[in-house]
Amino acid sequence: MMQTEGHGLFAKEEMNAKFGRKKLLISIKNLHKSFGDNHVLRGFNLELYDEENLVIVGKSGSGKSVLLKCIVGLAFPDKGTLRVLSKDVLNLPKAEMDLLRAEVGFLFQGSALYDSMTVRENLEFPLRRHKDRMVNESIDQLVLEALENVGLAEAIDLMPEELSGGMKRRVALARTIILRPKIILYDEPSSGLDPITAREISQLILNIQKIYKTASLIISHDIDFARSIANRFVILKEGIDYATGIYKDLVTSNDPNVKAFFNYET
């Protein structure tokens, strides 16, 4: 296993040059999570910086989705530290955790739209739960703005069943950004999409990053998709951050476990 600090390969000089002046938004140290005898996370470390796109890759069942659930308090780690926006997630009262979740958007793998609601109503739902997030704008203004930013203003009164898979993913992204979170968690955003639609979603992620100044933590099996949006990669293997680095370093690695993910000609 390659290592410099913690577990992973780390392009430290380049990373410091790019993110050294950025604010640290997520800090995870020595995180452990088991389900009975299944030890999913075994001392995982991660840092996410302001306006960074960080992609986590790993085999199916390696713990990527469990990690996201820990970040938003839907799963509770057995050991370690986890700070999100300077908040100690592992010791945060429920009311404060609910407030923190409004700062962390979550794009679910299956889009997770409410089938009985129109697109408009799907986007209104989080706003009605967090009215304190609305300052000088009305619900209608925020809904329209979010849909315009994903190129779907014309779909505002459609039902989810009338949408294609790519359109559903766009609506789900609009619902994610409508509270203007500081961090967005993406769980396999290109899953189930054809290559053209996947490229459209990758461009949307980059556009959203620029418009809303978000940081993103992205789970993806699709390396071509991931490389188009990633500032850095983390390889999650055997419960640890096996390797961390920028694409050009990882793709030229001689480590067979890294090459297993970056094993094609560029």
Image (spheres, grey):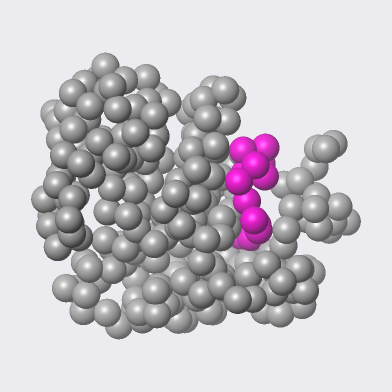
Q: For the C terminus, which image quadrant?
A: top right
Give the vertical position of 245 relative to 88 (above or below).
above
> Which image quadrant is residue 110 in?
top left
Q: Residue furthest top?
A: 162
Left or right placement of residue 262 versus residue 36 in this view: right
**Residue 133 in the image: x percent, y percent?**
20, 60
- Looking at the rendered structure, the number of numbered marks drawn on it comes to 0
Left or right placement of residue 234 versus residue 135 in this view: right
**Residue 195 in the image: x percent, y percent?**
59, 24
Left or right placement of residue 169 versus residue 2 in this view: left
Residue at the image position 31 percent from the left and 34 percent from the top? 147
Is residue 146 highlighted in magenta? Answer: no
Q: Nearer the viewer, residue 162 or 123?
A: 123
Is residue 232 highlighted in magenta? Answer: yes
Q: For the N terminus, which image quadrant?
A: bottom right
Which portion, as a residue range, is magenta? 223-236
Tell me if residue 32 can be seen. no
Residue at the image position 12 percent from the left and 57 percent from the top? 131
**Residue 46 in the image: x percent, y percent?**
56, 70
Give the vertical position of 210 relative to 132 (above or below).
above
Residue at the image position 74 percent from the left and 53 percent from the top? 247
Q: Nearer the viewer, residue 163 or 136?
A: 136
**Residue 246 in the image: x percent, y percent?**
73, 58
Residue at the image position 23 percent from the left and 27 percent from the top? 156
Q: Nearer the viewer, residue 99 or 108?
A: 99
